[in-house]
Amino acid sequence: MKIKVWLAAMALVSLPTVSFAQALPKPRVADLIRKVEDGVDAFRDYLERRGETARDKPSTAKGTRSRSGSTASTEARKDQATRTKDELDDALDELNRSTNRLRRKFDATDKWIETKVEVERVVDDGRKINQQVTRGSYGTEVARLWATLRAGINDLARAYGVAPLGV
């Protein structure tokens, strides 16, 4: 009797299960991808507007520097800010490329789950941005845009059965 119960339990464990990913229709997954694409575009647009505003705005600190202020430390802070911004831009470019690649391959296939590798790349590129945003101090707008984009990436990752981004 114990053997029969054990064999029955093993049969249940070994049955293939239908995952959440296989249950979604292709149009729903296409909508998840579109949300990520829109989030990347909104993030990119904001960073471009912010960069143009910074370039156009005259420096009010010019000529009002205190005698105790160090030009070297000011330049070092500017250099660090530029490097950080460039790293975020580079990470966003990579995410944009991986999202575009996902869209091209997704549209060309009938079995959308076959694009899981591309989704894994999108999530990996999202991790790079997550590190940049959490390390830097970009302000509330960047945090808000990233939270929206991160949620979209996480929804897409869950649809494919990929581990989502952390907070």
Image (spheres, rainbow, N blue to C red):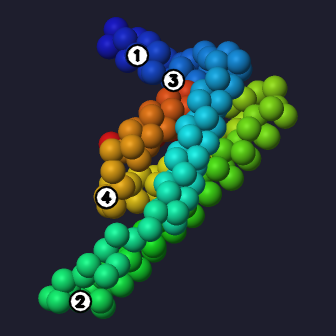
Residue placed under numbered mark 4 in the picture: 137
Residue placed under numbered mark 3 in the picture: 14
Tell us which disc is closer to us: 4 or 3. 4
Q: Earlier in the sequence, mark 2 or mark 1?
A: 1
Name the residue located 50 percent from the left edge and 57 percent from the top edge: 53
What amino acid does circle 4 point to? Ser
Q: Earlier in the sequence, mark 1 or mark 4?
A: 1
Q: Quadrant of residue 159?
A: top right
**Dot 3 lies on which element?**
helix
Nearest the camera: 100 or 52? Answer: 52
The image shows residue 58 at horizontal and vertical percentages of 44, 68
Cα distance in 3D space between marks 4 and 3: 49 Å
Report crowding for label 3: few under 14, some 14 to 19, many 20 or more residues within 10 A (C-alpha): few
Q: Is residue 158 visible?
A: no
Residue placed under numbered mark 2 in the picture: 70
Cα distance in 3D space between marks 3 and 2: 69 Å
What amino acid does circle 3 point to? Ser
Is the C-beta separation of discs 4 and 3 under 8 Å? no
Q: Earlier in the sequence, mark 3 or mark 2?
A: 3
Cα distance in 3D space between marks 2 and 1: 73 Å
Tell us which disc is closer to us: 3 or 2. 2
**Residue 9 circle label:** 1
Nearest the camera: 158 or 148? Answer: 148
**Dot 4 lies on which element?**
loop
Nearest the camera: 25 or 83? Answer: 83
Tell us which disc is closer to us: 4 or 2. 2
Cα distance in 3D space between marks 1 and 4: 53 Å
Report crowding for label 2: few under 14, some 14 to 19, many 20 or more residues within 10 A (C-alpha): few
What amino acid does circle 1 point to? Ala
Is the C-beta separation of discs 4 and 2 under 8 Å? no
